[in-house]
Image (tube, grey):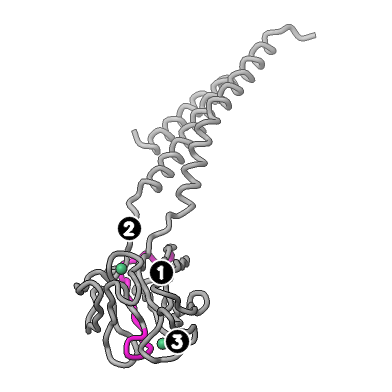
Amino acid sequence: MTWQGVNSALLAMTVRLKNGGQLQRHCIQTMKRALSLLALIAAGSAALAAPAPSGNLIVNGSFESTVLKPGSWAQVSTLPGWTWLAGPGTGFEVRNNVAGKAQDGQNYIELDTNGNTTIGQYLDSLNAGAGYALSFWYAPREFQPASTNGIQVFWNGVQLGDTLTGLGGSGNLWSQHQYRVTAQAGRNLLSFASVGTSDSVGGALDNVSLNRVPEPGSLALTLAALGGLWLLPRALRRQAQSRRAAALASTLPRG
Ligand SMILES: [Ca+2]
Ligand SMILES: [Ca+2]
Protein backbone atom coordinates (compact mmCIF):
# COMPACT_ATOMS: atom_id res chain seq x y z
CA MET A 1 0.00 0.00 0.00
CA THR A 2 1.30 3.45 -0.84
CA TRP A 3 1.62 6.29 1.67
CA GLN A 4 -1.43 7.92 0.05
CA GLY A 5 -3.33 4.64 0.45
CA VAL A 6 -2.43 4.38 4.12
CA ASN A 7 -3.47 7.97 4.68
CA SER A 8 -6.84 7.42 2.96
CA ALA A 9 -7.48 4.30 5.00
CA LEU A 10 -6.71 6.16 8.20
CA LEU A 11 -9.05 8.96 7.17
CA ALA A 12 -11.84 6.44 6.52
CA MET A 13 -11.24 4.85 9.92
CA THR A 14 -11.42 8.27 11.54
CA VAL A 15 -14.83 8.90 9.94
CA ARG A 16 -16.14 5.49 10.97
CA LEU A 17 -14.97 6.10 14.50
CA LYS A 18 -16.34 9.59 14.57
CA ASN A 19 -18.81 8.63 17.29
CA GLY A 20 -16.34 6.36 18.98
CA GLY A 21 -14.35 7.13 22.06
CA GLN A 22 -11.49 9.53 22.56
CA LEU A 23 -9.16 6.53 22.80
CA GLN A 24 -9.73 5.49 19.17
CA ARG A 25 -9.05 8.96 17.87
CA HIS A 26 -5.84 9.07 19.90
CA CYS A 27 -4.77 5.81 18.28
CA ILE A 28 -5.44 7.12 14.77
CA GLN A 29 -3.60 10.38 15.41
CA THR A 30 -0.64 8.55 16.91
CA MET A 31 -0.44 6.19 13.94
CA LYS A 32 -0.58 9.10 11.50
CA ARG A 33 2.19 10.91 13.33
CA ALA A 34 4.31 7.76 13.31
CA LEU A 35 3.77 7.26 9.58
CA SER A 36 4.61 10.91 8.91
CA LEU A 37 7.84 10.47 10.82
CA LEU A 38 8.68 7.33 8.86
CA ALA A 39 8.06 9.22 5.61
CA LEU A 40 10.43 11.94 6.85
CA ILE A 41 13.06 9.33 7.66
CA ALA A 42 12.66 7.77 4.21
CA ALA A 43 13.04 11.18 2.54
CA GLY A 44 16.11 12.04 4.60
CA SER A 45 17.71 8.68 3.95
CA ALA A 46 17.02 8.94 0.22
CA ALA A 47 18.60 12.40 0.11
CA LEU A 48 21.64 11.15 1.99
CA ALA A 49 21.96 8.05 -0.18
CA ALA A 50 21.51 9.95 -3.46
CA PRO A 51 24.59 9.51 -5.61
CA ALA A 52 26.71 12.65 -5.38
CA PRO A 53 29.76 13.38 -7.49
CA SER A 54 32.79 12.21 -5.60
CA GLY A 55 36.51 12.53 -6.01
CA ASN A 56 38.58 15.22 -7.63
CA LEU A 57 36.72 16.82 -10.55
CA ILE A 58 39.85 18.49 -11.96
CA VAL A 59 41.43 16.73 -14.93
CA ASN A 60 45.20 16.38 -14.61
CA GLY A 61 45.16 18.47 -11.43
CA SER A 62 48.61 17.23 -10.47
CA PHE A 63 50.08 17.80 -13.96
CA GLU A 64 51.30 14.22 -14.13
CA SER A 65 50.00 13.55 -17.67
CA THR A 66 53.15 15.00 -19.26
CA VAL A 67 56.01 12.50 -19.33
CA LEU A 68 59.37 14.08 -18.57
CA LYS A 69 62.77 12.79 -17.56
CA PRO A 70 63.34 13.18 -13.83
CA GLY A 71 65.11 16.46 -13.11
CA SER A 72 64.05 18.07 -16.39
CA TRP A 73 61.49 20.61 -17.54
CA ALA A 74 59.77 21.45 -20.82
CA GLN A 75 57.37 23.88 -22.38
CA VAL A 76 54.49 22.03 -23.97
CA SER A 77 51.75 23.41 -26.20
CA THR A 78 48.98 21.28 -24.74
CA LEU A 79 48.26 20.09 -21.26
CA PRO A 80 45.37 17.60 -20.78
CA GLY A 81 42.48 19.26 -18.98
CA TRP A 82 43.97 22.75 -19.10
CA THR A 83 43.56 25.67 -21.50
CA TRP A 84 46.04 28.47 -22.16
CA LEU A 85 44.10 31.72 -21.69
CA ALA A 86 46.58 34.60 -21.84
CA GLY A 87 50.28 35.44 -21.87
CA PRO A 88 53.24 35.43 -24.23
CA GLY A 89 53.24 32.29 -26.34
CA THR A 90 50.89 29.41 -25.71
CA GLY A 91 53.06 27.12 -23.68
CA PHE A 92 52.77 25.45 -20.31
CA GLU A 93 55.99 24.99 -18.37
CA VAL A 94 55.99 21.56 -16.74
CA ARG A 95 58.73 20.58 -14.33
CA ASN A 96 59.74 17.13 -13.10
CA ASN A 97 61.33 17.60 -9.69
CA VAL A 98 63.65 20.33 -10.96
CA ALA A 99 64.34 23.62 -9.12
CA GLY A 100 62.42 22.02 -6.30
CA LYS A 101 60.34 18.88 -5.84
CA ALA A 102 56.72 18.45 -6.81
CA GLN A 103 54.21 18.63 -3.99
CA ASP A 104 52.39 15.59 -5.38
CA GLY A 105 53.77 13.01 -7.82
CA GLN A 106 56.67 14.08 -10.03
CA ASN A 107 55.45 17.12 -11.94
CA TYR A 108 54.32 20.64 -11.19
CA ILE A 109 54.01 23.75 -13.36
CA GLU A 110 55.52 27.22 -13.21
CA LEU A 111 53.07 29.88 -14.36
CA ASP A 112 55.56 32.53 -15.52
CA THR A 113 56.47 30.56 -18.64
CA ASN A 114 58.07 33.03 -21.07
CA GLY A 115 56.25 35.74 -19.17
CA ASN A 116 53.16 36.03 -17.02
CA THR A 117 50.63 33.45 -18.19
CA THR A 118 47.03 32.61 -17.33
CA ILE A 119 45.78 29.05 -17.59
CA GLY A 120 42.41 27.58 -16.72
CA GLN A 121 40.19 24.53 -16.70
CA TYR A 122 36.59 24.57 -17.91
CA LEU A 123 34.11 22.51 -15.91
CA ASP A 124 30.90 21.66 -17.75
CA SER A 125 29.17 19.17 -15.47
CA LEU A 126 28.87 20.93 -12.12
CA ASN A 127 25.51 21.33 -10.38
CA ALA A 128 24.33 24.95 -10.47
CA GLY A 129 24.19 26.40 -6.97
CA ALA A 130 26.13 23.53 -5.40
CA GLY A 131 29.19 24.15 -3.23
CA TYR A 132 32.64 22.83 -4.12
CA ALA A 133 35.88 22.72 -2.14
CA LEU A 134 38.86 23.99 -4.11
CA SER A 135 42.36 23.13 -2.97
CA PHE A 136 45.79 23.66 -4.53
CA TRP A 137 49.43 24.04 -3.51
CA TYR A 138 51.59 27.06 -4.25
CA ALA A 139 55.33 27.63 -3.98
CA PRO A 140 57.45 30.70 -4.80
CA ARG A 141 60.31 30.13 -7.23
CA GLU A 142 63.42 29.25 -5.28
CA PHE A 143 65.77 32.13 -4.42
CA GLN A 144 63.53 34.64 -6.22
CA PRO A 145 61.95 37.71 -4.60
CA ALA A 146 58.24 38.04 -3.87
CA SER A 147 57.98 40.72 -6.56
CA THR A 148 58.22 38.05 -9.28
CA ASN A 149 56.49 35.08 -7.66
CA GLY A 150 52.85 36.13 -7.46
CA ILE A 151 49.92 34.05 -8.63
CA GLN A 152 46.21 34.74 -8.46
CA VAL A 153 43.32 32.28 -8.59
CA PHE A 154 39.93 33.04 -10.14
CA TRP A 155 36.55 31.31 -10.11
CA ASN A 156 34.44 32.36 -13.09
CA GLY A 157 36.59 35.46 -13.42
CA VAL A 158 36.30 36.55 -9.79
CA GLN A 159 39.54 36.50 -7.80
CA LEU A 160 39.58 34.27 -4.72
CA GLY A 161 41.50 35.72 -1.79
CA ASP A 162 44.62 37.79 -2.10
CA THR A 163 47.58 37.45 -4.44
CA LEU A 164 49.85 34.63 -3.31
CA THR A 165 53.55 35.39 -3.31
CA GLY A 166 56.64 35.09 -1.19
CA LEU A 167 60.42 34.97 -1.14
CA GLY A 168 61.68 31.71 -2.53
CA GLY A 169 64.02 29.61 -0.40
CA SER A 170 65.92 26.46 -1.32
CA GLY A 171 63.67 24.17 -3.35
CA ASN A 172 59.90 24.48 -3.36
CA LEU A 173 58.29 25.62 -0.12
CA TRP A 174 54.74 24.46 -0.74
CA SER A 175 51.69 25.85 1.02
CA GLN A 176 48.11 24.63 0.62
CA HIS A 177 45.29 27.04 -0.19
CA GLN A 178 41.62 26.19 0.07
CA TYR A 179 38.45 28.00 -0.96
CA ARG A 180 34.75 27.23 -1.06
CA VAL A 181 33.18 28.06 -4.43
CA THR A 182 29.65 27.83 -5.82
CA ALA A 183 28.91 26.51 -9.30
CA GLN A 184 26.97 28.61 -11.75
CA ALA A 185 24.66 27.15 -14.38
CA GLY A 186 26.39 25.86 -17.49
CA ARG A 187 30.12 26.22 -17.85
CA ASN A 188 32.39 27.13 -14.93
CA LEU A 189 36.02 28.22 -15.19
CA LEU A 190 38.84 27.81 -12.69
CA SER A 191 41.90 29.85 -13.68
CA PHE A 192 45.34 30.76 -12.38
CA ALA A 193 47.44 33.75 -13.43
CA SER A 194 51.04 34.63 -12.65
CA VAL A 195 51.50 38.28 -11.67
CA GLY A 196 54.35 40.58 -10.68
CA THR A 197 57.54 40.91 -12.70
CA SER A 198 57.08 39.10 -16.01
CA ASP A 199 60.51 37.52 -16.39
CA SER A 200 60.08 33.76 -17.03
CA VAL A 201 60.52 32.81 -13.38
CA GLY A 202 57.66 32.82 -10.92
CA GLY A 203 55.22 30.92 -8.75
CA ALA A 204 54.63 27.16 -8.99
CA LEU A 205 51.37 25.23 -8.82
CA ASP A 206 50.56 21.59 -8.04
CA ASN A 207 47.87 19.22 -6.80
CA VAL A 208 44.74 21.15 -7.78
CA SER A 209 41.51 19.52 -6.64
CA LEU A 210 37.81 20.37 -6.65
CA ASN A 211 35.38 18.24 -4.67
CA ARG A 212 31.65 18.51 -4.18
CA VAL A 213 30.71 19.63 -0.68
CA PRO A 214 27.91 17.48 0.83
CA GLU A 215 24.75 19.50 1.25
CA PRO A 216 24.17 20.11 4.98
CA GLY A 217 20.38 20.08 4.49
CA SER A 218 20.36 16.39 3.61
CA LEU A 219 22.42 15.44 6.63
CA ALA A 220 20.41 17.66 8.98
CA LEU A 221 17.14 16.18 7.70
CA THR A 222 18.32 12.64 8.29
CA LEU A 223 19.66 13.43 11.76
CA ALA A 224 16.38 15.13 12.65
CA ALA A 225 14.45 12.08 11.46
CA LEU A 226 16.69 9.71 13.42
CA GLY A 227 16.27 11.92 16.49
CA GLY A 228 12.51 11.71 16.07
CA LEU A 229 12.72 7.94 15.81
CA TRP A 230 14.57 7.82 19.12
CA LEU A 231 11.96 10.03 20.79
CA LEU A 232 8.93 8.23 19.33
CA PRO A 233 8.70 5.33 21.82
CA ARG A 234 8.80 7.75 24.75
CA ALA A 235 6.03 9.88 23.20
CA LEU A 236 3.89 6.81 22.58
CA ARG A 237 4.37 5.61 26.17
CA ARG A 238 3.31 8.99 27.51
CA GLN A 239 0.19 9.02 25.35
CA ALA A 240 -0.73 5.51 26.46
CA GLN A 241 -0.31 6.52 30.11
CA SER A 242 -2.52 9.57 29.56
CA ARG A 243 -5.21 7.46 27.95
CA ARG A 244 -5.15 4.88 30.76
CA ALA A 245 -5.42 7.64 33.35
CA ALA A 246 -8.36 9.21 31.49
CA ALA A 247 -10.09 5.85 31.16
CA LEU A 248 -9.62 5.15 34.88
CA ALA A 249 -10.92 8.58 35.83
CA SER A 250 -14.06 8.01 33.74
CA THR A 251 -14.89 4.85 35.73
CA LEU A 252 -14.67 6.55 39.14
CA PRO A 253 -17.96 7.67 40.73
CA ARG A 254 -18.47 11.38 40.48
CA GLY A 255 -18.65 13.19 43.80
CA1 LIG B 1 52.18 16.89 -9.41
CA1 LIG C 1 57.91 36.39 -12.62
Q: Find out if the beta carbon at label 3 lies less than 8 Å from the nearest ligand 2 atom.
A: yes
Q: Amino acid at mark 3?
A: Thr
Quarter of the image where one finds residue 43: top left
Q: Give the class, few, some or many, for how many residues have Cα within 10 Å of label 1's Cα (few <14, many ≥20).
A: many
CA separation in Å, label 1 and label 3: 18 Å
Residue 165 in the image, given as x and y percentages of width and height:
48, 79
Q: Does the residue at mark 1 contact the one at mark 3 (Cβ under 8 Å)?
A: no
Task: Report the residue at 19% width, 72% height from top.
Answer: 67
Residue at 42 percent of width and 66 percent of height = 134
Q: Nearer the viewer, mark 1 or mark 3?
A: 3
Magenta part mainly helix, strand or loop? loop
Contact, mark 2 vs mark 3 (Cβ under 8 Å): no
Q: Which numbered disc covers residue 148?
A: 3
Numbered disc 1: secondary structure: strand
Q: Nearer the viewer, residue 141 or 87?
A: 141
Q: Mark 1 to mark 2: distance in Å?
A: 17 Å
Ligand 1, image quadrant it occupies: bottom left
Q: Earlier in the sequence, mark 1 or mark 2?
A: 2
Which residues are the magenta region? 112-130
Can see residue 181?
no
Q: Eyeballing the image, is 129 above or below 155? A: above
Q: Secondary structure at mark 3?
A: helix
Residue farthest right in this picture = 255
Answer with mark 1 or mark 3, whichever residue precedes in sequence.
Answer: 1
- Residue depicted at 45% across the width and 78% down the height: 168
